[in-house]
Amino acid sequence: MLVEGLGKVTFVNGILRIQTLGVAHDGEIKETGQIEIPGNMVGDVITALSKSATDISSKMGEENNSSNKSESKKKDTEKNKKKKN
């Protein structure tokens, strides 16, 4: 299920229901599904999602930094080669 946005959110009969939205092939916003979380688990699920997103974001940042450092080293090596010639 692709989630590009959230629609209606309700809490009925001890269940948190979250309508998920996405952009259809015609450009219209349409429902892509529904997330249903038992009321006693809402806090745990939100905490786990938040932690996971933070961890992924950190890893992506580390990969970008590593990539930038290696590009910088390549450029420095190329500059040094040109200076020697």
Image (cartoon, helix red, strand yellow):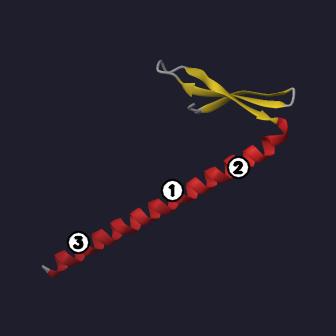
Task: State which quadrant residue 40 falls in.
Answer: top right
Nearest the eye: 43 or 85? 43
Mark on residue 48?
2
Which residue sits at x=33%, y=72%? 73
Q: Which residue is mark 1?
A: 60
Q: Which residue is mark 3?
A: 78
Mark 3 or mark 1, whichever is nearer to me: 1
Mark 3 or mark 2, whichever is nearer to me: 2
Measured Cα–Cα span from mark 2 to mark 1: 18 Å
Nearest the eye: 37 or 20? 37
Horizontal and vertical percent for residue 67? 40, 62
Q: Are marks 3 and 2 in contact (CB under 8 Å)?
A: no
- Location of the N terminus (image quadrant): top right
Within 10 angstroms of label 1, few (less than 14), some, or many (20 or more) residues?
Answer: few
Q: Compared with residue 44, is residue 85 higher up or lower down, i.e. above or below?
A: below
Using residue 45 as the reference point, say whether residue 23 is left or right of it: left
Which residue sits at x=36%, y=68%? 70
